[in-house]
Amino acid sequence: MVLQFIDESKPRFLKTIFYGIDGSGKSTGAQLYCESRGLNPVVIDFDCTNHTGLPRLKCDWDSDRDVINGVISIIKDVETDSRFDTLIIDGVGTFNNLLLPKGKESQRTYLVRTQNFKKIWKVLLHSRINVIFIGQKDMIVTEENESSKFAEMINNMVDYKFHCSHTGKGFTNDDFTYVCTKTRGEIEPLIGKPIISKPVTSSIPVTPKEEAPMPQLITDCMNALYERGMEPTIDKVKRCILDKCENDLNPDKTIYKECIRWIDNNLNIGGI
């Protein structure tokens, strides 16, 4: 038998994961990661929470079989689509759950879920595209915790891992941290934060419709919600503004109306 060697001159496609709790800037970090490397991503948004403005694929899957065939089909389609070179799988926890066959839960159904993912995993391993996974803390694999086979397979696959965190204070670059916890130095030197080509102004998706700056009271309310461990939503922010105005000894209805009008014209907060 003649030994055959890998052609090292061919481009290597990166596999990366961003993980952290809600509101830690995972989707934004993945977007900035792509921008800093000139990648052209498309997103499978399993949780419908990716509001970065990146193109999201329409998926309508009812069964685990639909998910398997759908994801494999998307991988192959992205490979042949000249517009994209990167697939972002956002919400890998939900992705994992959708691979669970419907019906009564048992050891057998969990085994089938692992087998289902292996079919996609094999295609991902040999795909000619970059792949980015976005997940929460259940994707952390350590010697101490009981990790799922699903998480272990993804962690073994990726070249880079980024732990995302938010200080709970403001929305500047310094309030979001992306720490590289795994790197393959032979591929490219990468330590610490991914290169950020633009400022992170907010973890809340904003679609500008007018040039007026965000009123300070809105920023104060969002910061107050984060400090309480709450995810800002349109309803929560509006309620906070109302409470602050009503509790003011000299309430200014003009400020309240200005804030509400600004929110209605500018903010699109996921989940509402």
Image (tube, rainbow, N blue to C red):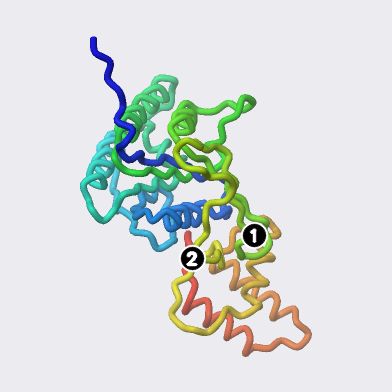
Distance from disc 1 to disc 2, alpha carbons, whole Å, reads 16 Å
Residue farthest top in this picture: 1
- Residue at the right extreme? 249
Q: Residue 203 or 200: which is nearer the viewer? A: 200
* N-terminal label among 1 and 2: 1
| Residue situated in front as seen by the camera: 261 or 150 | 150
- For mark 2, give the secondary structure: loop
Could you tell me residue 28's position as x and y percent? 49, 57
Local packing at callout 1 (Cα closer than 10 Å; few below 14, some 14-19, many 20+) is: some
Image point (58%, 81%), residue name? 259
Q: Which mark is on residue 175?
A: 1
Q: For the residue labelled by badge 1, is the local secondary structure a helix, a strand or a loop?
A: helix
Q: Residue 119: give x, y in percent of width and height.
A: 31, 29
Tag in front: 1 or 2? 1
- Residue drawn at 28 percent across, 42 percent down: 75
Q: Circle 2 is placed at which residue position?
A: 205
The amino acid beneath tag 2 is Pro
Give me the residue at 43% from left, 32% from top.
Answer: 157
Depth order, front residue of 94/104: 94
Q: Is residue 26 left or right of residue 96?
A: right
